[in-house]
Image (tube, rainbow, N blue to C red):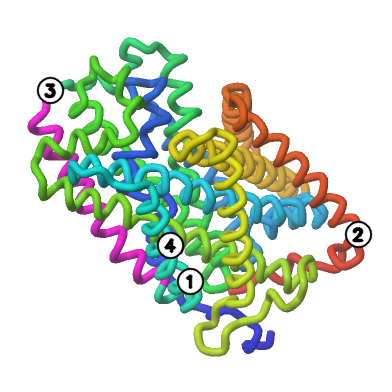
Amino acid sequence: MDNSSSLNKNSVGTGGLVFQAMGQLSPIGIFGGSILGAAAFALGATPLSFIIGLLASLLAGNSIYQYSKKMASARGYYGYIGDGLGMSAGSLAAFLYILYEFANLLFILSYYVLTFSPTLGFVSGLSIPDYYSYLYIILISIPAFYVVYRGIKLSYKSQIVANMIQIIFVITISIAIIVFSPKIGLLPFTAYHVGIKGVFLGFITGSYLSFAGFGSIVPLGEEARAGRKSIGKAVLYIILIMGAIYLLGSYAMVAGWGINAMASFSNSIYPGFIIVGKFGHLPTDIFFILNFFVVYPLFVTMGTALSRNLYAMAKDNMLPHGLSAIHNTNRSPHVALGYILVIFTGLSLVSSIIFFYAEKGFFNGFFDDFLFFAAVSTITTLVIHVMVNFSLYSKFRKEREYSAVKVSTHVLLPTISTIIIVLAIYYSVVSLTFPIAYGPIIILTYGIIALAYIFIKKKDILKIHIKEDLYE
């Protein structure tokens, strides 16, 4: 292989991959967006919903783990799916992954534009103009995308620093909240006042989706050391680590808010600040800085994963070959990143204007903007995970190895995962209201256009050899 057209091989080990993925799961998020959806339904039983979310995520992670042992490349998910279901399905997954990551970037942008000015006003006691949110998101985006441009080494090293600081704060403040709050014992681990249905809805609408992003390191297979070993291990480690953090943080939030007052928890856009604020100005100020700096690791992880996906698609002639260009010094797909920046900027401007005027105001506009792209992101990633599960089924049939372990890891666990994901998609779709309900329509339309494009490029796509991914 021509090294001048390759990414920086053997650049990141298992530990670096864990922190790279952690950038998208966001430890500090358990005090804000990560918990709001779950708490809206599970109320005092929110920690129980996060335990269920952890178990369901491990089931989904199993499919990645099994496939990662067979192949590792920048193709990521679409390499897995192409191997098991053929490259027509793999190509569709590649285009769906593009939609997923752009929707991710846009819903993160919308959420933090929505919350920055009001939260700064809450913390400072001042009236903060809305345009401060725009300035903040521009300033935080610049270093994030610059780090993606500089390559994977700077990316994962900066993620280690950013996420270790978050972890230390979350653990410290969570313990303090639990110690100084009324004792609630094991009640949060029961279906307290909400029943099994409430816990399940909390799991579907919040806790399960909080783990979304653990697969963001799958497209780093070409840059990982011993990728067929490290990718799968890192996926399982990140699920377990974040599961423990989410469990501790959610328990602290329930204890701090009051287990019998959780009905009002999700009505606030900054419940974490209300609880942390009880400990004085210094913890609140630290929390504010960490909470809004988190856009940096989020954008770094998403930008890195998406740029590798585009790079791989271009090398496979699914996209213009120029997108596969690699920076001579940084060994990053800088041309693909440039296109990402242009498209992301254009989409953010267009969507912001549409929602701002459609909903006649800043708060309602960006709130619906956030919900719309969150729905698109959620449904798309769930569809991709179902495709990976079916690809694993197909691989099982081809290999014809019928040991108990193989049946469990390649059939039973993926089947349970698929059932959970289908339920998650169902509840995600049926709970949508206007204009967020347009999300599934957008995904379907995009999918049809992608399939038409794949049909046109069929000759090139059928020439793709997934077995090239099998290397050490």
Q: Seen in the image, is 347 located left or right of residue 184? A: right
Compared with residue 146, is residue 358 higher up or lower down, i.e. above or below? above
- Indicate the position of residue 233 as horizontal and vertical percent values: 46, 57
Please tell me whether mark 1 or mark 3 is closer to you in this view: 1
- Residue at image x 51%, y 59%? 302
What residue is disc 4 on?
Answer: 138
Closer to viewer: mark 2 or mark 3: 2
Q: Residue at x 72, y 50 (%)?
A: 395
Q: Which residue is mark 2?
A: 456
Horizontally, residue 467 falls left or right of residue 104, namely right
Instruction: Determine the image quadrant of residue 267.
Output: top left
Q: Which residues are magenta?
A: 155-182
Amino acid on which the number 2 mark rests in the picture: Ile
Residue corresponding to mark 3: 183
4 or 1: tag closer to the N-terminus: 4
Mark nearer the N terminus (2 vs 3): 3
Tell me if mark 2 has few (under 14), some (14-19) or many (20+) residues whose alpha carbon lies within 10 angstroms of its own: few
Sequence-wise, the earlier of marks 4 and 2 is: 4
